[in-house]
Amino acid sequence: MEIDCLFCKIANGQTATDFLFENDKLVVFRDINPHAPVHLLIVPKRHIRSINDLTEGDNAILAEMITTARRMAKKERVDASGYKLLFNVEKGGGQVIFHLHLHLIGGWKK
Ligand code: 5GP
Ligand code: ZN
């Protein structure tokens, strides 16, 4: 865990946050400043700074983040209407929290 990383603290239970899903590798919680009716963050427990820092050894966690997002989309009932999955990468890509996370955004009126 990185001492000063907010998502390390959240994902490892040191900052109280309601999880919609948790297993030994990742957590899912609602974005504090949602951009849509459904805005979830899928966050690995292990600290990885960004997509730029992934190695081949991270392929499994990356796949699990995406399949978890898909399952959460169904649970939140946005699977049929459609949703966005988004990684912001580094400052120029809009990343503000430098701990890897996948945004699941959806639920707009059709
Ligand atoms: P980024 O721009 O780094 O891809 O997205 C970071 C996201 O984390 C933002 O959408 C922001 O609203 C969300 N966020 C920042 N701090 C907190 C927090 O303390 N709790 C939750 N639930 N979300 C947060
Ligand atoms: Zn971290």
Image (cartoon, grey):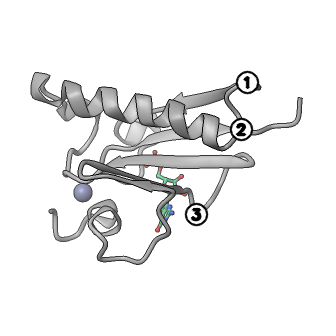
In space, the residues marked 1 and 3 are separated at their CA atoms by 25 Å
The answer to whether the residue labelled 1 contacts the one labelled 2, judged by CB atoms less than 8 Å apart, is yes
Of labels 2 and 3, earlier in sequence is 3
- Using residue 82 as the reference point, say whether residue 28 is left or right of it: left
Numbered disc 2: secondary structure: loop
43 w.r.t. 63: above or below: below
| Residue wearing tag 2 | 77
Residue lying at 26% horizontally and 66% vertically, measured from the top left: 12
Q: In the rendered structure, which amino acid carries the disc numbered 1?
A: Ala
Point out the image quarter for the N terminus: bottom left
Of labels 1 and 3, earlier in sequence is 3
For mark 2, does the 10 Å Cα neighbourhood hold few (<14), some (14 to 19), or many (20 or more) residues? some
89 w.r.t. 22: above or below: above
| Residue wearing tag 1 | 80
Residue 47 image point, x, y percent: 20, 51
Q: In the rendered structure, which amino acid carries the disc numbered 3?
A: Ile
Q: In the rendered structure, which amino acid carries the disc numbered 2?
A: Arg
Give the quarter of the image for residue 55. Answer: top left
13 w.r.t. 70: above or below: below
Residue 33 image point, x, y percent: 62, 60
Point out the image quarter for the C terminus: top right
Report the front residue among 109 and 95. 109
| Residue wearing tag 3 | 32
Numbered disc 1: secondary structure: loop
For mark 3, does the 10 Å Cα neighbourhood hold few (<14), some (14 to 19), or many (20 or more) residues? few
